[in-house]
Amino acid sequence: MRSALRKIPEVLLTALYGLAGTLAAVLMLPFWLVVDARSGGGTPSRYGFIPRRVREAADRAGTIWLHAASVGEIGVLARILPRIAALTPDLPVVVTTVTSTGRERARQLLGESVFLLYLPLDSPVIVRRAIRRLHPQVLVIAETELWPNLILQTAAYGTRLVVVNGRLSVRGFRRYLWLRAAMSRVLARLDLVCVKSAADAERFVALGADRNRVAVTGDLKSEPLARIEDEPVPARRARLGLPLERPIFTAGSTRQGEEEIVLEACRPVFNEHPDLLLVLAPRYPHRAAEVESLIAGAGYDAVRRSTLPSGSGPGPARVLLLDTIGELESIYAASDTAFVGGSLVPTGGHNLLEPALYAVPVLFGPYTGETAGADELLLGAGGGRRVASAGELGAQLADLLADPALRRDIGEAAREAVAAGRGTRSDIVERYRRLLGLQHASERRGRPDRGSIVAAEAGEEP
């Protein structure tokens, strides 16, 4: 009796959330129609209506379903998708995103090898409709896309649930604590939770995940993208249309207030290296007009990446404004040195490992609290340098550009520091393989017959 009473808050919160999700989905239909029309359509899949070509592929044996919110999470999945897809070559792969930019990045990285859809809105009715058409054998979720109805409904269907690169910041953990009664019911359904750090593991367990199913596997972003890693730098530049002879400094993921610092830092460096190309990549491309004005105000000529024909370079412009989605990692890999933004202003920093993966020296500011120790890793190995002002950034950049041997040594130290911790991908794939092996061997949680989802929700064997 007491056990049943304890479950009442969980069930009530879940029911209320499901009702709110359904109501929100109905009210937001006009919004999604407008938003998706601007990016090529796709609203039906948000409401659980799956295209016929996907349904026909899924009907043969089911699907492997991977979900990522947007661009960053797609980058995570792209590092493991080829290996996990190879384990079940007869099953089609469906990748869902929330944003159109995420979908475009998935198209760039994954091409025609997967079906690309938008994630169904988190209403139990909508999610069930999508599940019955996709027949997912496994759902792989990147990072913190913990949609309650998505997880509960796929678990009820008999789908294996896997989280990769799981992370819960202190701030996110505190928010989830307010809904712990409901979240514990959700997280208890996860079959495998691969997290970035021990702190993330403890937070998942504290919210209700089964400790025996949580594994600290590290950060998938410490693994390079093979298609970039295998290219020599001249080939990287040629593919991107970047000049072969000019030194390139990329300031990536910059936030408001940082572009002015970077431009000021580069002024004396331009005097010493008049052929320097600064690639300035704001974190949010919609700020491109604002950043372009800052560049003009600083007296530099700039060209937007989006205006260049495919394969074309910036010409004599001093600044290439990267206002496109999904190219930053490739451009980091083709640079002589890099600055990672979100770190000179108090936003917590962004992915410091991205340039380090490709032996590029990394500069960053003092605000790196959200980088999961990547700052200390690079500093300890001598593969990165912390700066606190425009003057310090300019001085470090000038030193690196003036000394190719120093630049090479710091870049190699950065790459080796990251490489020492590699193995995340292999670990996750092996755990995934074992999970599927259990499923295939016992056949206890195979795909239920169509229509049996109601019985599964009621707690009956399908």
Image (tube, grey):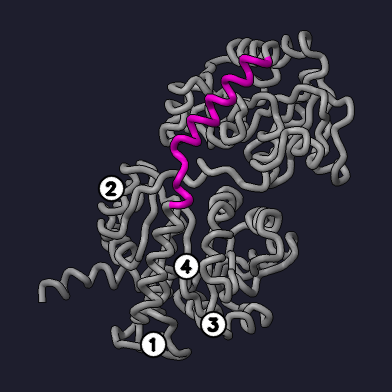
Instruction: Please tell me which of labels 1 and 4 falls first in the chain.
Output: 4
Whole-Å distance between the Cαs marked 1 and 4? 19 Å
Say which element carries label 4.
strand
Whole-Å distance between the Cαs marked 3 and 4? 15 Å
Q: Residue 202 carries which label?
A: 2
Whole-Å distance between the Cαs marked 3 and 2? 36 Å
Q: In this view, does 359 lie to the left or right of 285?
A: left
Q: Can residue 255 be seen in this view?
A: no
- Segment colored magenta: 404-426
Nearest the viewer among 368 and 15 is 368
Whole-Å distance between the Cαs marked 2 and 1? 34 Å
Nearest the viewer among 8 and 343 is 343
Q: Which of marks 3 and 2 is in front?
A: 3
User: Residue 435 falls in which quadrant of the image?
Assistant: bottom left
**What amino acid is labelled 4 in the image?**
Leu
The residue sitting at 35% across, 41% down in the picture is 170
Mark 3 nearby-residue class (10 Å; few <14, some 14–19, many ≥20) = some
Which residue is denoted by mark 4 in the rendering?
139
Residue 448 coordinates in the image, percent (x, y): 42, 86
Instruction: Please tell me which of labels 3 and 4 falls first in the chain.
Output: 3
Q: Is residue 419 left or right of residue 288?
A: left
Residue 81 coordinates in the image, percent (x, y): 56, 59
Whole-Å distance between the Cαs marked 2 and 4? 23 Å
**What amino acid is labelled 1 in the image?**
Val
Q: Are marks 3 and 1 in contact (CB under 8 Å)?
A: no
Nearest the viewer among 268 and 44 is 268
Instruction: Please tell me which of labels 3 and 2 falls first in the chain.
Output: 3
